[in-house]
Image (tube, rainbow, N blue to C red):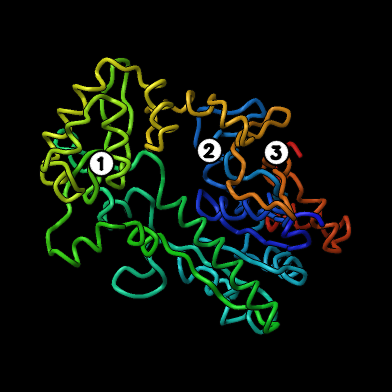
Amino acid sequence: MGAALHGLKVVDLTRVLAGPLCTQMLADHGAQVVKVEPPGGDETRQLGPPFDLDGHAAYFSALNRGKRSISLDLSTPGGQQVLHRLLEGADVLIENFLPGTMDRWGLGYEQALAAAYPRLVYCSVTGFGADGPLGGLPGYDAVLQALCGVMSINGDAATGATRVGIPVVDHLTGYVALSAILMALLARARTGQGQRVEATLYDTALSLLLPHASNWFASQKSPGLLGSAHPNIAPYDKFRARDGELFIGILNDGQFRRFCGHVGLQGLAEDERFASNTARLAHRDALRCAIEAAIARHDCGPLCDALMRAGVPSGPVLSVPQALAHPHCAHRQMVVRAGNYTGLRAPMRLAGTPGAPGGPPPAFAQHADEVLQELGFAAPQRQALHASGAAPVPAAA
């Protein structure tokens, strides 16, 4: 049957993380993605070291496989002409310019594209949206983590408020954009009409505040720093064993009794201080001391394996290299290797219409001539577009 999105044509005007992640996932599942970069290229091409064996910044490589690359100066008539040719056969356009940029070029959705391409799904990815007190302002992952309360609940007394170590807001915004695009395509299948969809870092960051926002709504107590602990569940935290740290996530009383029986704390489950989750939360510090004393003679790996097989969720705290070397990572085929390229596959798997990681990330404007020729530009026209800077290519090309 082929990949789920086979035949879908996507014009990708995005740079950095959220947009390119979204379009890479579309490409992995069969979409034809043309990455349209500004004359200076996607900023992540410069975010190194490290660089891979093909000379690409590892950051860029992580987000741009399976795409063809062309560069357009969309402020020029020539660049706009090429974009319109691309849109004639496109299903999706996704961009992450500052709000108003496309309108300034005469390429706004309501201004021009909706009437010209009524089946087009137009996705804008922005920091804050186009209007409101923060509308039109630039947004970056860590700034949104700070502004939307994410940092305020991450960290402990020693560190203070701390940025989550992965760009979680950018990352999730890519999935929000992906979901919105797929919903709009489903709606188009019923109505025949495209539409504009939006994903903002601001909305995404606030949506991460679960359960902290609902805790605040219910209690009017401001959530604070808990380190690795959970505000509503105990024990649900990081603990130290003999050879390192592990995380134990116990959600109900049955799991707690099984845990206590396995580590020799049978009496703890009968202690009224720990007989329910509410009681365990109230005596969190005493519970921590008892658990760490009991597991101090155990190594993390064997203990976690035994607990998991007893139905108690737990896992050793692994480094990135250790996590990627785990046998289950290999079993799930999460690491993609092709020639000099190594990356992580998209996490969704479809049994009937499986996707497959595309080719390696493109060099800047690598497919310019190929794409322009497909769009009907003759050789002299292509040369004129290159020479004028409307569709630039590297000097060496």
Q: Secondary structure at mark 2?
A: helix
Number of the label disc, if any, that sits on residue 286: none
How far from the left and from the top, in percent, is residue 346? Answer: 60, 46
Number of the label disc, if any, that sits on residue 162: 1
Q: CA distance from mark 2 to mark 1?
A: 22 Å
Give me the residue at 70% from left, 38% from top. 360
Location of mark 3 (residue): 360
Number of the label disc, if any, that sits on residue 59: 2
- Amino acid type at image mark 3: Pro
Give me the residue at 69% from left, 81% from top. 116
How far from the left and from the top, in percent, is residue 212? Answer: 25, 57
| Apparent side of residue 2 relative to residue 10 in the rendered image (left or right) | right
Q: CA distance from mark 1 to mark 3?
A: 34 Å
**Residue contact at pointers 3 and 2, CB within 8 angstroms:** no
- Amino acid type at image mark 2: Tyr
How far from the left and from the top, in percent, is residue 326? Answer: 53, 26
- Amino acid type at image mark 1: Thr
Q: Quadrant of the C terminus?
A: top right
Eye-nearest disc, 1 or 3: 1
Residue 322 in the image: above or below residue 191: above
Residue 264 vs residue 17, the one in the foreground = 264
Q: Quadrant of the N terminus?
A: bottom right
Say which label, 1 or 3, has the lower sequence index: 1
| Apparent side of residue 132 relative to residue 86 in the rendered image (left or right) | left
Q: Secondary structure at mark 3?
A: loop
Q: CA distance from mark 3 to mark 2?
A: 13 Å
Give me the residue at 81% from left, 51% from top. 369
Q: Residues within 10 Å of mark 2 (few under 14, many from 20)?
A: many
**Residue contact at pointers 1 and 3, CB within 8 angstroms:** no
